[in-house]
Image: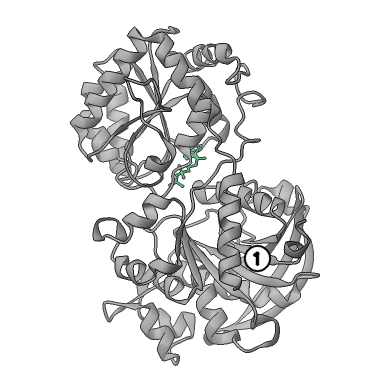
Amino acid sequence: MAAKKEKIGVLFAAFEAVPFLKTGGLGDVAGSLPKALKKEGYDVRVVLPKVWAIPEKYRAKMTHLADFYFPLSWRSVYCGIETYTYKGITYYFIDNEYYFKRDGIYGYFDEGERMAYFSKAICEIIPYLPDFDCRILHCHDWHTALAPVYLRECYRGQGIYEKIRTVFTVHNLKFQGQMSEYVMGDIIGLQDCPAAVSQLRINHDAVNFMKGALSYSDMISTVSPSYAQEIQNPFYGEHLERIFQRRWQSLWGILNGIDTDVYDPAKDKYIAANYSAEDPHDKKLCKLALQREFNLEENETIPVVIMIGRLTQQKGLDLVSCIVDEMLELPIHLIILGTGDAEYENMLRETEYRHQDKMRLCLTFDEKLSHRMYAGGDVLLMPSLFEPCGLTQMIAMRYGTLPLVRETGGLKDSVSYYNEYTGEGTGFGFANYNAHEMLFAMKGIVGLFANEPEVWRKLLIQAMQQDFSWDHAAKTYDAMYKEVLK
Ligand code: ADP
């Protein structure tokens, strides 16, 4: 049945992917979407950088495939290819210790050069990949954004490159890779290519990697239908809205899924008790265990509000800082897990100090704790200023933790808001980026939790019954790939 698709090779390129590396939603998506596309009949392989943050247990299992040098501007740079097959997907790791053997993952002074190197290496390795007929190069976020540019400007017309089509997916438009225009020649090496210069340049004196990908890729996508619309407007477009307007016919909005094997309250080994939509009774054991773990009053009747994610402006921390004290006057527990901007971390530290009986703050990245919180929470607060997709609210719903979200982007597309007349819904929403609107919604939720336990139970079950698997998204990616190969 899928025979004709079996041969179509898709090379996924991202800077992070679960289980090797994850700092946010990109890692989840690059880790789980290839599996779903494989089920659709594609030969999907994934290329990642061999950064030293990848746990040693994986690095030790990688085998050497090839090595060579290639030109990057005036440099001749080393490129090793290591490979490892994990759960049926073949991964290729680009090895260059100068760029990738560092303590951290992102945020270095030479980020432009690292990502230019990575993008060009993605193109360079293609002829070395065994038994692979690469027809689609699918790049994710700005770290890989120069790959479609290089592919067209440096490799066009050369053998196997000729038939490769490019897709670029925007996971976060906030990070575009903006550099001084000096990188055009000294780093990127495309200063003598007028098309590249004009497509990459912004404001006469800067270069924008993502702008290049958006202009050069055959197809572009982002991670929810609503966000695909929103980014065509200046408020959400981060100064690239004109490109999205111009390319609207090639712009797809495809809602992410989550890995329903990893996030499964019925099987999750990290949580105190397992439960399911059919029998959610033991969720309360997870809640009591969470309250105990954090030395909060063990009390089923107090709703536990959780927040998990980056503590940044995007995630609505300005709203939280405005009303957190008023919110903590409500009979709730508030547990926050995340890292981010110092101003928000400090604000939350001080708030925790003032509300030691009600609030806990964990300024760290802790995957296992996040599972315990998803299972033990009652409400997830996610008041994002903008949200391309958001996975946190989907994971929360899968664990029967009802999200309160601002109605934007992927939050709008994944949460159905409680309707008090019909009883329908899987969470709650508020429309405007307004702290008191959020507080008002939270008050209503706390009232509902206290006074309508049957309604709450029904909502919890409805949330858990939602299908957040990748199946639907994979079918839409399949349609997009067919379109790009036409
Ligand atoms: P982002 O914009 O950061 O990609 P998403 O909601 O799309 O946000 O995805 C965030 C992912 O990262 C979720 O899987 C969430 O559970 C996880 N995550 C975020 N912060 C933390 C943290 N501090 N500890 C553990 N997991 C986290």
Residue type at the position of mark 1: Leu
What residue is rendered at 23% in x and 26% in y? 439
- Which of the pair 331/254 is nearer the observer? 254
Residue at image mark 1: 11
What residue is rendered at 64% in x and 26% in y? 268
* Side of 461 where 137 appears, left or right: right
Above or below for 191 versus 171 = below
Above or below for 307 versus 443 = below
The x and y percentages for residue 6 are 76, 62
The quadrant holding residue 49 is bottom right
The x and y percentages for residue 8 are 71, 66
Judge whether residue 130 can be spotted in this image: yes
As drawn, which residue projects farthest toward the bottom? Answer: 192
- Which of the pair 79/24 is nearer the observer? 24
The kind of secondary structure element at disc 1 is: strand
Total numbered labels: 1
The x and y percentages for residue 337 are 43, 32
- Which of the pair 301/363 is nearer the observer? 301
Above or below for 467 versus 266 = below
Report if the beta carbon of the residue with label 1 is closer than 8 angstroms to ligand 1: no
Q: Quadrant of the C terminus?
A: bottom right
Q: Residues within 10 Å of mark 1 (few under 14, many from 20)?
A: many
The quadrant holding residue 249 is bottom left
Q: Quadrant of the N terminus?
A: bottom right
